[in-house]
Image (cartoon, helix red, strand yellow):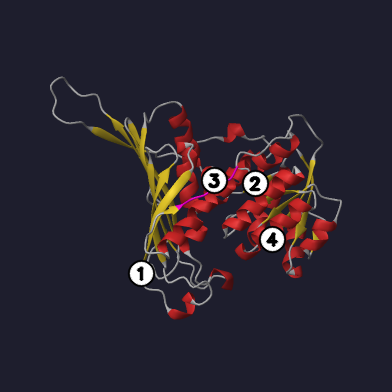
Amino acid sequence: MNMGQTSKVRIAVVGLGFGSSFAKIYKDHPDVEYVGLCEINETKLHEIGDALGIERRHTSLDEVIASDAYDAVHLLTPIPLHAQQSLAILNSGKHCACAVPMGTTLEELQAIVDASRTNQRNYMMMETAVYTYYFLMVKEMVERGEFGRIQFLRGAHYQDMENWPAYWSGLPPMHYATHAVSPLLAISKSRATKVHCFGSGYMRDELKQKHGNPYPIESAIFQLDDGLLSAEVTRTLFHTARGGLESFNVYGEETSFEWHLHNESPILFKKKEQPPGAWGLQFEPHPVSEKPDFRHLLPEQIAHHVNGGHHGSHPYLVHEFISSIVEKRNPWIDAVTSANWTAAGICAHQSAMNGGAEMIIPSFR
């Protein structure tokens, strides 16, 4: 897309269970003209609309898509709807932001990439994990060369989805792995090219039926496209006694980063200067005791929203999506990047279902 400025963006937020927090940010963004809300639960729609002071309200996505009142739509709907709804939005001539994952088949990913390109409209997967306080800190340190050469990466997402909405029932863990995969690929500026993945654990029969998935846990090793790096990812979804966690670890020659527990500080390990003739190397742990502050990257009107969900990521996602439209450029997490990050998990599950066999991960361009 060509660079240049356009008028303010008119956006609809669809799905208010999780979407109300985003609607607040869009409402405050200086490049947003107005926000509309869409929610099938009419009681919830009016409660949130009244609370936020937003008058434009819809109970049907079809109504939003057919309307000329919007330039863009942000989807926060159930996973099985993401791909088809994204395609409908793009094909209507509107820009589309969508909660993770982009889709659950390789064919869906390719269709969205094609639709974004054909219609010349932005698609952005709203991946929270690449805008957290700690991701932004590590990204900046890596770009300054403080890690030296990166040697290995590890990601994990632990969450038991028992008693969540029915569409989660029996979902293959790696179909919802982007929170663990994307920080590793983004930090290393790489694409996963092949994967071996194994399933683990017992899954009760009624959870197996919907997707034919027998695994509550899947663990994968990915080869990255430089041929020198690999990354390990573990995802749990059921039958695992562990509170929710999204973490990533980066191991470099000079500095390494580990983040294992949400209620404990991440740790940077830095190589110490060695005295002459010393045997071995020493590394000093440095707990990150204060949250890094990157509010300078945001317009002042939305900077206060960094105290919100998903480790402060929401306003950065909103700002990138809106800025990409206003500046007539692709967003950082564009359709191709979204597809490459999502395909890694889809192919990992295929590997697990084939006894850990190597799977080649297609490249989307």
Look at the image and tell me whether residue 62 can be seen.
yes
Q: Which residue is mark 3?
A: 363
In the structure shown, which secondary structural element does the residue marked by tag 2 occupy? strand
23 in the magenta segment: no
Going by the numbered disc 1, the residue's amino acid type is: Gly
In the figure, is residue 180 to the left or right of 25? left
Q: Residues within 10 Å of mark 4 (few under 14, many from 20)?
A: few
Q: Secondary structure at mark 3?
A: loop
Q: Is residue 141 left or right of residue 297?
A: left
Q: Earlier in the sequence, mark 2 or mark 4?
A: 4
Is residue 361 found inside the magenta-colored segment of the image? yes
Q: Nearer the viewer, residue 281 or 125?
A: 125
Give the residue type that dot 2 points to: Met
Residue under label 1, please give it.
Answer: 201
| Label 3 with label 2: CB-CB less than 8 Å | no
Q: Which residues are magenta?
A: 360-365
Residue toward you, 238 or 267: 238
Rendering quarter of residue 184? top left
Q: Is residue 331 above or below residue 36?
A: above
Q: Residue at x 61, y 53 (%)?
A: 109
Q: Rounded to the nearest whole Å, what is the CA distance between mark 2 and mark 4?
A: 15 Å
Residue type, numbered disc 4: Gln
Tell me residue 40's x, y (percent).
74, 68
Reply above or below: 117 against 137. below
Give the foreground label among 4 and 1: 4
The residue where tag 4 is placed is 84
